[in-house]
Image (cartoon, rainbow, N blue to C red):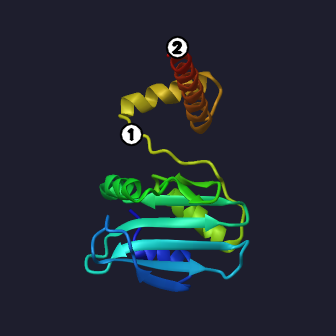
Amino acid sequence: MITLKDFMETVNYKISEGSDYLWNCYGENSYRLDSWNGENDGYSASIVFDTKTQVVYETTAYDYQFNRAYRMINPDYIKKHNKEGKKCGVNVKQAWDDVDYVDLDVEEDFLEKLLAIVSGEDYDTRVLIPVDMTEVQFALVARAAHEADMTLNEFFEQALTEYVKENHKLKEQNDTDC
């Protein structure tokens, strides 16, 4: 999970607000720091952490110019967060109005997006997905990508796109079969 140091460096140590975190899912020592550039079409970012242990529970980046919201929740606390949201009647997927969070799993992905948002630069909106495979599996995928005359990234992107499309078709079939 991202550290306080990572967050502070990425927002250039600019903290605009801080407060106790009001939900109970992260415990009684949870605190939230916010960084906002003061512009309605700018950015804000936040980090929620434990004041005693320094464990980071959640971090968010809001790009108001392009209506995008990115979030990372510590995997050990996702269930507690979602359970409390449901109990409070809060749509935990929604950042604001009609903007949903894009949940990220790779620290570098979040930090790259946050840094670009803070700097007002363009950034890749695609989501990095961690892939865990053996060397043998990697060699097989690399060979298949080579035979398809594609980079590994292109190969994985195509495979994931096809997988999502196929699962969407199956879901639609199952929905109409009922």
Which of these two is toward me, 160 or 28?
A: 28
Return the mark for residue 177.
2
Taking 16 as reference, is 159 above or below it?
A: above
Q: Which residue is mark 1?
A: 132
Q: Quadrant of residue 48?
A: bottom left
Residue 178 to residue 57: above or below: above
Report if the CB atoms under discs 2 and 1 are less than 8 Å apart: no
**Which residue is outermost to the top?**
177
Badge 2 amino acid? Asp
Which quadrant, please, contains the N terminus? bottom left
- Residue 61 locus on image (x, y percent): 56, 66
Q: Nearer the viewer, mark 2 or mark 1?
A: 2
Residue 159 picture location, percent across and down: 56, 28
Mark 1, secondary structure of its residue: loop
Residue 28 position (above or below residue 87) = below
Name the residue located 32 percent from the left edge and 64 percent from the top edge. 25
Name the residue: 55% across, 33% down.
156
Q: Is residue 46 left or right of residue 146?
A: left
Residue 44 place in picture, x, y as percent: 60, 73
The part of the image, by quadrant, that contains residue 4 is bottom left
- Type of residue at label 1? Asp
